[in-house]
Amino acid sequence: MSVIRRVPSILTGLVNNNNNRTICFKSSEPSISSSTLSSSLTHGIHVFHCPDVVGIVAKLSECIASKGGNILSADVFVPQNKHVFYSRSDFVFDPVKWPRVQMEEDFLKLSETFNAMRSVVRVPSLDPKYKIAVLASKQDHCLVDLLHGWQDGRFPVDISCVISNHYRATNTHVIRFLERHGIPYHYLDTTKENKREGEILDLVQNTDFLVLARYMQILSGNFLRTYGNDVINIHHGLLPSFKGGSPSKQAFDAGVKLIGATSHFVTEELDSGPIIEQMVERVSHRDNLQSFVQKSENLEKQCLSNAIRSYCELRVLPYEEKKTVVF
């Protein structure tokens, strides 16, 4: 009988809260250096969501190991009394021994075996980058941070365009940056009666997801249904508190001691979509409105950046109607 060596065998974390099973595995084999990875092995990610039955982890491990792959880490979550299974696996493999097309077929068979609701495999070095469009209004901080993060290689995305309902002159930092990198900027003046959603839909065709980098317009249900892909938003507050306009001033006037930022998926219900990331920072009576807003904006940039990276790394899975599993 052959022995599968590459199944992760060290249990590094096990949390059982109210019968929820959250398990983190780490490979027991020697760590692989970055030079080895770059010269012979390729990094892959697989996420799985299916009804919970016995043997899923074993079959996932066998699928990868049987092709000579090695699981570097695996996260598993089974919520209490829900009978559903979630997992995310990081692994390395030799693309010569396990071609990308064959990998897709192997995981598809596994998906059919377990009647999976979601089975996605991604090989960042081989697969196309995510194509996104960014929507922004007057405030620049999230947009500028996203553009510089893209330039620095922090996000595995290609930015197809930036769309705004705010006019920016040609000598502004944002326009100079976009022109230097060949990214189109579309100014669409919106009114209460005309949100220019049809034109936006034309501009974002063939994108994988949208990012609202402080876009101060509400997208209609018809827009979301027609677009059909995910839309990620940043809100400067810990939702569901301080919704709507000027949440920083609302929080400042309320005398809060903790401020936050929330990145979430956009749904038809205002600021109520599934949460991807939240961050907090302490404030005090020593803060004036200016320092309060500055701290809030720094949180927004970090929170949106973390959410985009998590999404691109397949760390975010839908859970129930308004929740997410974030590995």
Image (spheres, helix red, strand yellow):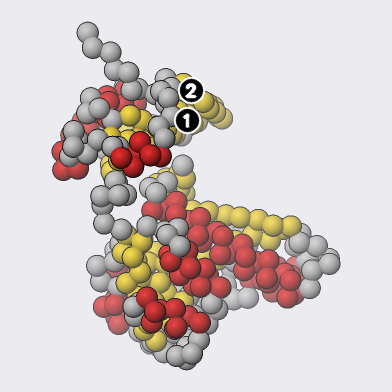
Q: In which quadrant of the rendered view does residue 8 lie?
A: top left
Crowd band around label 2 with a 10 angstrom C-alpha radius: few (<14), some (14–19), many (20+)? few
Identify the residue at horizontal 45%, vertical 83% (top origin).
176
- Residue 253: give x, y in percent of width and height: 75, 72
Q: Is residue 152 left or right of residue 49?
A: right
Identify the residue at horizontal 28%, vertical 37% (top origin).
40
Q: In this view, does 175 lie to the left or right of 249?
A: left
- Residue 326: give x, y in percent of width and height: 47, 45
Q: CB under 8 Å between callouts 2 and 1? A: yes
Secondary structure found at label 2: strand
Residue holding disc 1:
24
* Amino acid, disc 1: Cys
* Amino acid, disc 2: Leu
Identify the residue at horizontal 75%, vertical 68% (top origin).
254
Residue holding disc 2:
11
Q: In which quadrant of the rendered view does residue 218 lie?
A: bottom left
Secondary structure found at label 1: strand
183 vs 292, nearest the viewer:
183
275 vs 121, nearest the viewer:
121
Identify the residue at horizontal 74%, vertical 57% (top origin).
282
Query: Is residue 269 visible in the rendered structure shown here?
Result: no
Query: Is residue 161 visible in the rendered structure shown here?
Result: yes
Cα separation between marks 2 and 1:
7 Å
